[in-house]
Image (cartoon, rainbow, N blue to C red):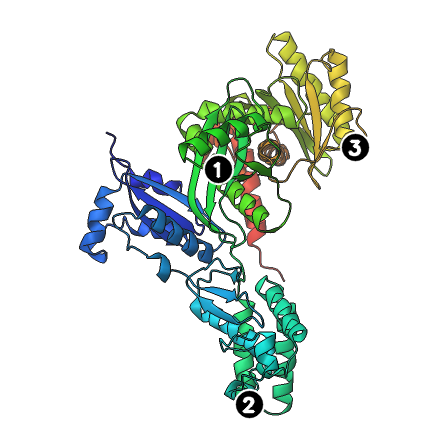
Amino acid sequence: MDIFDYREALKKIPHRPGVYQYYDKQGILIYIGKAKDLKNRVSSYFLKDEYLHNAKTRVLVRKINKITFTIVDTETDAWLLENSLIKKHQPRYNVLLKDDKTYPWIVIKNERFPRIFWTRKIIKDGSKYFGPYASVGMMHAILGVIKELFPLRTCNLPLTPTNIEQGKFRVCLEYQIGNCKGPCQAFQHEHDYNANIDNIKDILNGKTGIVFKQLKANLDSAIAHLDFEGAHALKQKLDLLSNYQSKSTIVSNTINDVDIFNIASEEGYAFVNFLKVMNGTVIQTQTIELKKRLDESDQELLSLAVQELRTRFNSTSNEIIVPFALDVESPNFKQTIPQLGDKKKLLDLSYKNVSFFKRERLDQYEKLNPEIKTERLLNKMKDDLRLNVLPKHIECFDNSNFQGKYPVSAIVVFKDAKPSKKDYRHFNVKTVEGPNDFATMEEAVYRRYKRMLEEEKSLPQLIIIDGGKGQLSSALKSLKKLGIDRKVTVIGIAKRLEELYYPGDQYPLYLDKRSETLKVIQHLRDEAHRFGITFHRNQRSRKTFQTELEQIAGIGKTSAEKLLLTFKSVKKIKEASKEQLMQIISTKQADAVLEYFNEHVAENQIEPK
């Protein structure tokens, strides 16, 4: 069996909240944990300083042979999911959590004049349960706010119409201090009490606007009456309420015994995530991979995966939640395609997990097989740019000049979406006078492909022109002269908004700013600009130095070029001895050069008056 490489496993884990699972060599689940940051938490187990862990943890780490994880939206969701998975699988190295000592719920009791209180046990008697709550303190804060806003009874008296009419009960201390309005003696009518209950349900369902408004009003009133102690208490409740999450994306008591499926597909592969929900809680999660054989649709693949996963997990749920209708007729379950609400949140959570799994798996494939990444990228570029063939060979043109002088044109070449620097070329423009970028582009394109045709070299599948419609038209003019305008695709890219222009197309094409295709095109454009600017600067400096040398008596263009080729710069020529200069030019010329530079040094050393 292969040795477990935890470093490779850690590379795949994201900085996201979630739940991680450890398996041993036999594939047995031995530990489940939660984390606000999965990568940091899992990495901490493999620190070299073993003294940081206790003996049990060190034994656990030595047994780890596989790591899986499920990402969620928040730390609270991670806590809830960990809890349910531990109860389901009971791994050896986890503390056993009993069902009646898990997380608390708020219940609105199914009775006349319903009581509201918290419980850890759900009784199916028609009562309404909200939660669960990961923070007991937050739950009590919500109950306190509700109690302050809506006085309710706390007694368990049987408040039937007969008992109330016969006057069997008397108001208690809660009524005297204002915490109850006395429904036991008909001081509060049932419809008024139930209206308060409806408001409370709205609050517990996440509609907390009314709570904030009431608390803010109470806070302002307390401040106005200089009740600073009361104002402080109200401010604390406001702060708690602002951090409160009335519902978890993991758990909803309204959803019971359903299967959730979502799919993310790629060229040649598809990935399907499965979430099993029982009693409002995710108890199982699994992502599988499907390899396409005949370019099957997502609908076909998801239908196949639903049957496979339901069989694998022996699921008898009578409802499945899916992103689109499946061509599957079964008397055992109905299909739900949610648009809003708790079910839509669970479907979105499933998609987050399958999308991350897809990215991680494809990254792994592409690291092991770089040709897979190249083929995928070229296919994507072909689709994005509406090409008929894969753009295996791409060339990009860019022009440079300085105030209309020293015009040059640069060409960079990418093969298989990577720079091929040995094929880079540059041109000194010969036929253009002054700052004419369009004519410069026309000359460069013409010279480039005229030579390629003469040498019978393969033409690129894609030509990119750094510029807008004007430069693109100039390039197309040269391609038409050569008769190859229909043999290659040529597009222009404008810098300001990254617009892509096609010949004859009035409107530009815009690619997603995060698109891999756009990133390759930007790389080409930036590389052409860099290569062109570097060559242009060298040419400008060389011609400037050459012009300065030609000002020396007896030094012509040929001698100046020889000196620059040998010494590389005017500075080194200035520092050269007569003997060194005489190896390149004559004795008379060497004396002239030395005299010229000595005079300039003397002039620069004269103190200004």
Amino acid beneath label 2: Gln
SS at mark 2 in the image? helix
| Residue 150: percent from left, percent from top | 60, 77
Quadrant, the N terminus = top left
Q: CA distance from mark 1 to mark 2?
A: 57 Å
Q: Earlier in the sequence, mark 2 or mark 3?
A: 2
Visible in this render: residue 14? Answer: no
Residue corresponding to mark 3:
507
| Residue 230: percent from left, percent from top | 55, 86
Residue 283 vs residue 384, the one in the foreground: 283
Amino acid beneath label 3: Tyr
- Whether residue 138 sits left or right of residue 428 in the image: it is left
**Residue neighbourhood size for the residue with mark 1, other residues' Cα within 10 Å, grouped as few (<14), some (14–19), many (≥20):** many
Amino acid beneath label 1: Asn
**Residue neighbourhood size for the residue with mark 2, other residues' Cα within 10 Å, grouped as few (<14), some (14–19), many (≥20):** few
- Whether residue 267 sits left or right of residue 364 in the image: it is right
- Whether residue 32 sits left or right of residue 473 in the image: it is left
| Residue 607: percent from left, percent from top | 58, 59
Residue 461 against residue 224 in the figure, above or below: above
Q: Are marks 1 and 3 in contact (CB under 8 Å)?
A: no
Labelled disc at residue 273: 1
Q: CA distance from mark 1 to mark 3?
A: 40 Å
Which is closer to the viewer, label 1 or label 3? 1
All told, the count of numbered labels is: 3
Visible in this render: residue 543? Answer: yes
Residue 282 vs residue 430, the one in the foreground: 282
Residue corresponding to mark 2:
176
**Residue neighbourhood size for the residue with mark 3, other residues' Cα within 10 Å, grouped as few (<14), some (14–19), many (≥20):** few
Q: CA distance from mark 2 to mark 3?
A: 76 Å
Labelled disc at residue 481: none
